[in-house]
Amino acid sequence: MTPTAPLRSRKAQIDRVATSLFRARGFAATSMRELATELGLEAGSLYSHIKSKEEILHRVCFGLADDFFAAFATATTDTAVPIATQLRLAIEGHVRVLTRDSAASTVFLQEWRHLSEPARTEFLALRDRYEAAFRALVQQGIATGELHAPDASFVTLTLLASLNWLPAWYRPDGNLTPDEIAHRLAEQLLQGLEGRRVSG
Amino acid sequence: MTPTAPLRSRKAQIDRVATSLFRARGFAATSMRELATELGLEAGSLYSHIKSKEEILHRVCFGLADDFFAAFATATTDTAVPIATQLRLAIEGHVRVLTRDSAASTVFLQEWRHLSEPARTEFLALRDRYEAAFRALVQQGIATGELHAPDASFVTLTLLASLNWLPAWYRPDGNLTPDEIAHRLAEQLLQGLEGRRVSG
DNA sequence: TATGCTTGCTAACGCTCGTTAGCAAGCGAA
DNA sequence: TTCGCTTGCTAACGAGCGTTAGCAAGCATA
């Protein structure tokens, strides 16, 4: 039924509701009592299913990190494909993960800093690794002459920024499907990078 | 001394320290006792200078909103200037505000949702008005043929997203000055929009 | 000298927080 | 039927929260 998580386990249901609350109010401003009420039970009952509030945040953040890495790997498996195409596929994969569960994506992007150590440091390392993978792709594209830009880091930062703003305005019932959005974003971002124009 | 706020009033000093804490930990996760300690005094003493915790957030958010509007107005006063140039100036102005006080900018961008009503709604109205002004500029540019894009809304969203990610990675002691960053960002974003290429 | 503003303290208020202990009902598997 | 897992309750813990009241020292101005 719900596109984001299976209904079978109570734990998954808690994660799902908590994620949407974390998105709406922020992690620190969401209370366990609020979460329990939303689920129709008492605060103490939550602890039959989870160990702590932060455990939920941890699962959301690291779960989504896995998704992003998986999407990127899929987009870049075939090294025979032109870099520009690989980058386009990576962008589309990234957007697909973002739109599949925009509540979780927002939490992933905004609330990770409420992770305590060492999870916080681990998370940042993952994020850096992901950005580095994107940057390497851009750099490769510049080296082969497929992409034109003076600075791969700069390009990568603005590119991911454009993409990561998506959960802030994306609405599943909007007039663009996730794939259309992904395609448009890739088009718009790469037109500049590729230095060519498709139409007027 | 400090580039962000004058030292003369204790109130301004509280605002400045609070802003940096709000940025680091988030508004909800920052306690008044923590803020007081950082300032070398007791929690109760803060209330000789401010009315509430939220008052600080309010001042930061609405103060920066004023700055953004002022910068945009300055960039677009001369209507004889080509739209593409006005847009470039608006981008550079926006970046200048962002980099002048990146802690306050981060709070402005991330923590506004902890404003209670009606301030929250007022803030969102301001933000919408600002985005609409940018969008109108883009739309005008498309109409005159100076800019090429299928959808002004889409362009504006990704454009502002790229810019607003800046406080997340900008470091005042980095190897690019704010003006260089502003120029590069404008260049990179408009090269795509303008459909031309400066160099290889 | 008197006024009033700025600045800061101590002590405490009512409240909410995340979490735990102990108990119990339901239910599928052995 | 018994075992054990899932699910949920009530009651309470210690801690921290934002905020207030009441008081007082310092200091510039009138």
Image (tube, coloured by chain):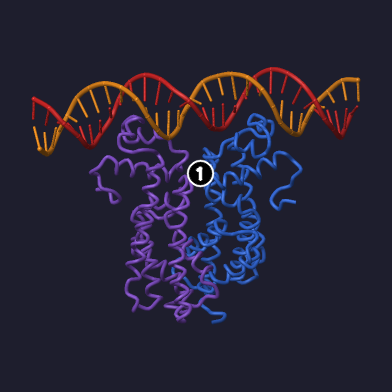
Chain colours: A blue, B purple, C red, D orange
| Residue D23, quarter of picture | top left
* Image position of C25 (left or right of B200): right
Q: Residue at x 67, y 39 (%)?
A: A39
Pick the front one: B74 or B22 = B74
Pick the front one: B128 or A12 = B128
Callout 1 environment at 10 Å: few (<14), some (14 to 19), or many (20+)? some
Place of residue B62 in the rendered image (x, y in percent of width and height, measured from the top left):
38, 52
Amino acid at the residue labelled 1 = Arg
Q: Chain of mark 1?
A: A
Place of residue A79 in the rendered image (x, y in percent of width and height, measured from the top left):
64, 67
- In this view, B143 is above or below B34: below
* Image position of A178 (left or right of D1): left
* Image position of B146 (left or right of A85): left
Q: Residue at x 55, y 56 (%)?
A: A168
Q: Quadrant of the C terminus of chain A?
A: bottom right
- In this view, B164 is above or below B148: above
| Residue A7, quarter of picture | top right
Place of residue A60 in the rendered image (x, y in percent of width and height, measured from the top left):
62, 45
Pick the front one: A40 or B38 = A40
Place of residue B164 in the rendered image (x, y in percent of width and height, measured from the top left):
45, 58
Secondary element under disc 1, as helix, strand or loop, is: helix
- Number of marks in the rendered image: 1
The residue singled out by tag 1 in the image is: A113
* Image position of D11 (left or right of B72): right
